Image (spheres, rainbow, N blue to C red):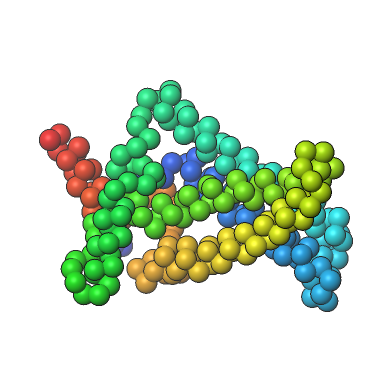
């Protein structure tokens, strides 16, 4: 009888909290994009059919705002965890394990350009590559402006008591076009860099399982692997 292959060695990369938050963002971001574009193009025939299936413009609008609230709850939880990580656990939020931009990211970017043109070797990434950090900050910062403009559209009476009325129109303009940019970025950059890579196609499962196989750990995050081995050896 043929024996089953040994289970590949793997290492913990993401905690349960971060995996749950990522799923929350995927689910709510997708519904926000769908309902938002349906409401924006509600005058077209195809959009009217789908909006009607959601209970009309009122139902689609309610679902859009509901998902927006839960998406932002996920962001608030993540920020609260960062404070807990820093204040309670007394851990550093900067350094090689951090998503904060660092000098090495610029060096890796330059090295990657040289590699593209066959002028050197590929960069050795640490826990997060510069593009993964861009993914993180694109969501973190983008959701702030999307949230502010969304609130202005949601409560126009309140905000027109503070700002001139045409600010609501400006907010609507920015809200829609930033939504277009967000969907384009996720669909083109994040998907191609994360999920459509030949080694993991059709999906990068690490963010869902929380684990990364040793081979990928060594290949994709060699600098982190070196530090991991150093700590294991007690050097």
Q: In this view, does 204 lie to the left or right of 121?
A: right
Residue 80 against residue 113 in the figure, above or below: above
Q: In this view, does 221 lie to the left or right of 176?
A: left
For this orientation, the residue located farthest to the front is 164
What percent of the width, then of the height, locates residue 168? 77, 51
**The quadrant where residue 48 appears:** bottom right
Residue 77 against residue 202 in the figure, above or below: above
Quadrant where the N terminus is found in the figure: bottom left
Residue 23 visible in rendering: no
**The quadrant where residue 161 appears:** top right
Residue 124 visible in rendering: yes
The residue under the point 53% across, 62% down is 186
Q: Nearer the viewer, residue 4 or 55?
A: 55
What percent of the width, then of the height, locates residue 95? 30, 39
Q: Is residue 4 left or right of residue 27?
A: left
What percent of the width, then of the height, locates residue 173? 71, 59
Quadrant where the C terminus is found in the figure: top left
The residue under the point 84% across, 55% down is 59
């Amino acid at each position: 009888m043929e024996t089953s292959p040994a289970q590949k060695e793997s290492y913990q990369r993401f905690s349960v909290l971060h995996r749950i938050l990522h799923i929350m963002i995927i689910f709510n971001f997708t519904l926000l994009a769908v309902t938002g574009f349906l409401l924006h193009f509600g005058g077209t025939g195809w959009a009217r059919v789908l909006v009607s299936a959601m209970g009309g413009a009122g139902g689609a609008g309610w679902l859009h705002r509901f998902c927006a609230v839960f998406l932002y709850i996920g962001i608030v939880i993540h920020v609260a965890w960062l404070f807990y990580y820093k204040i309670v656990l007394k851990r550093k939020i900067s350094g090689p394990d951090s998503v904060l931009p660092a000098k090495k990211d610029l060096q890796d970017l330059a090295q990657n350009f040289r590699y593209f043109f066959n002028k050197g070797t590929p960069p050795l990434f640490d826990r997060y590559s510069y593009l993964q950090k861009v993914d993180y900050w694109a969501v973190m910062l983008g959701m702030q402006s999307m949230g502010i403009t969304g609130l202005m559209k949601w409560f126009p009476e309140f905000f027109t008591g503070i700002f001139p009325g045409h600010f609501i129109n400006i907010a609507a303009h920015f809200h829609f076009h930033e939504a277009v940019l967000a969907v384009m970025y996720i669909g083109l950059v994040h998907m191609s860099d994360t999920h459509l890579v030949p080694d993991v196609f059709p999906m990068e499962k690490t963010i869902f399982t929380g684990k990364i196989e040793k081979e990928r750990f060594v290949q994709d995050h060699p600098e982190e692997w070196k530090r991991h081995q150093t700590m294991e050896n007690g050097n």
